Image (cartoon, rainbow, N blue to C red):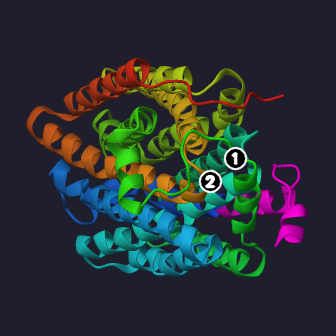
Amino acid sequence: MALQQATIKLGIVENLPQFALLVVINAFVGGMIGIERSILPTLAEVEFGLAERTAILSFIAVFGVTKAFSNYVAGRLGDRWGRKPVLIAGWIIAAPVPFLLMWGPTWTWIIVANVFLGVSQGLTWSTAVIMKIDLAGPKNRGLAMGLNEFAGYFAVAASAWATGYIAVRYGLRPEPFYLGVGFVAAGLLLSILAVRETRSHIAVEVASHVADTDGQYSEAEIFKQTTWRDRNLSSATQAGLVNNLNDGMAWGLFPLIFVAAGLNLSQIGILASIYPGVWGVAQLITGSLSDRIGRKWLIAAGMWVQAGGILVTALSAGFGLFAVGAVLLGLGTAMVYPTLLASIGDIAHPSWRGSAVGVYRLWRDLGYAFGAVIAGVVADYFGLSMAAIVVASLTFLSGCIVAIRMSETLRTPAH
């Protein structure tokens, strides 16, 4: 074992082939979300006749809940049984999704598709995150998360644009969802044939780990620390929840806001791709930046920029200003998303880091459900713009909590 550890090195460059492979796999994971991003709210109205915003956003709520709990399971199983089996299981569970979206005869079938999608996303994306943290080690953790989230959300953007384009040319179903079949096939084959287990890298990091906590936390204690007891972990967790709360609102309500403003499906597809596209590309900068300037203020400022982007969208009525709002929302999310994951990696002991990431991602992705419910109810009673304004206010408040309660978590400066 000691000889094996001696041959293992931590770092992105030192593990570049496997790291790059996991980046590519996470792009396929992101692509699976993108196939729904621009057209599913319109599909709900046009093909299934849904009118109430709460009903339309039900697919996001179901996705968020199932993804949240599978995130938690992924962390626990990854720590106990290894990362690779969890990754493969996630892709197997994704296999029915594109076919249900293509041929489901009622909205209930679309909900079922999002149960499978949520479970799959929790297992695959969480595992890809944890494996990259394992490989990168502490020095370039922010960069590692930036590359991971760039791949995932740039793929969301590209897939959202592509499905919108295909829908304009061929219709809402089934052609736009053919992409999903390719994503599942590629992700599953690469995971089985090329991915290597990363748990041996944890032993190397543990051997040189210096932290205020040890590796003896129980599952219940890890949950408490990440949810409320540790000021830094819990501050990151609430910011992650609110981030995905506003993302759920943007996913479900923004296309309806754009329709109400008279935009066509092609324009909606472009706008649906701008936000995750900016988010994805900017993370190449923000993830690495957090390794240099720290995590706390990048997170707080990012939440405030998000709030501004949502507010611009809520108060606008044309494509140009909608695009400005999408860019701001993407930039703010890029400042927050990889930085939150890096901060969890900073704090958690390597031996329970997978579980801590699972708890964080449990609460973070429950934000989708909270966002769908809050935005749907407010939109039904007070209108689409008011729903967006309420979510913008919650996002601004979350940034204030980080600014007041969280300490800087970066301990190892990048050189």
Circle 1: residue type: His
Question: Which structural element holds mark 2?
Answer: helix
Viewer-closest of 91 and 200? 200
Residue occupied by mark 1: 209
Q: Is 215 on the left or on the right of 45, as rendered?
A: right
Q: How far apart are marks 1 and 2 (CA)?
A: 8 Å
> Is residue 192 part of the magenta span, yes or no?
no
Determine whether 86 is above or below 140 in the image.
below
Q: Give the range drawn in magenta.
A: 1-25
Q: Position of residue 258 (x, y in %)?
A: 35, 37
Mark 2 sits on what residue? Answer: 350
Amino acid under disc 2 = Pro
Callout 1 touching callout 2 (CB < 8 Å): yes
Q: Position of residue 162 (x, y in %)?
A: 58, 55
Residue 282 visible to an observer of this rendering: yes
Identify the image quadrant of the C terminus.
top right
Question: In the image, residue 46 lies at what x, y percent?
Answer: 27, 59
Q: In which quarter of the image is residue 116?
A: bottom left
Position of residue 279 measured from the top left corner of the image (x, y, whole percent): 57, 37
Q: Residues within 10 Å of mark 1 (few under 14, many from 20)?
A: some
Viewer-proximal residue among 42 and 247: 247
**Can residue 38 be seen at all in this image of the molecule?**
no
Identified at 82% across, 73% down, the residue is 1
Q: Is residue 14 magenta?
A: yes
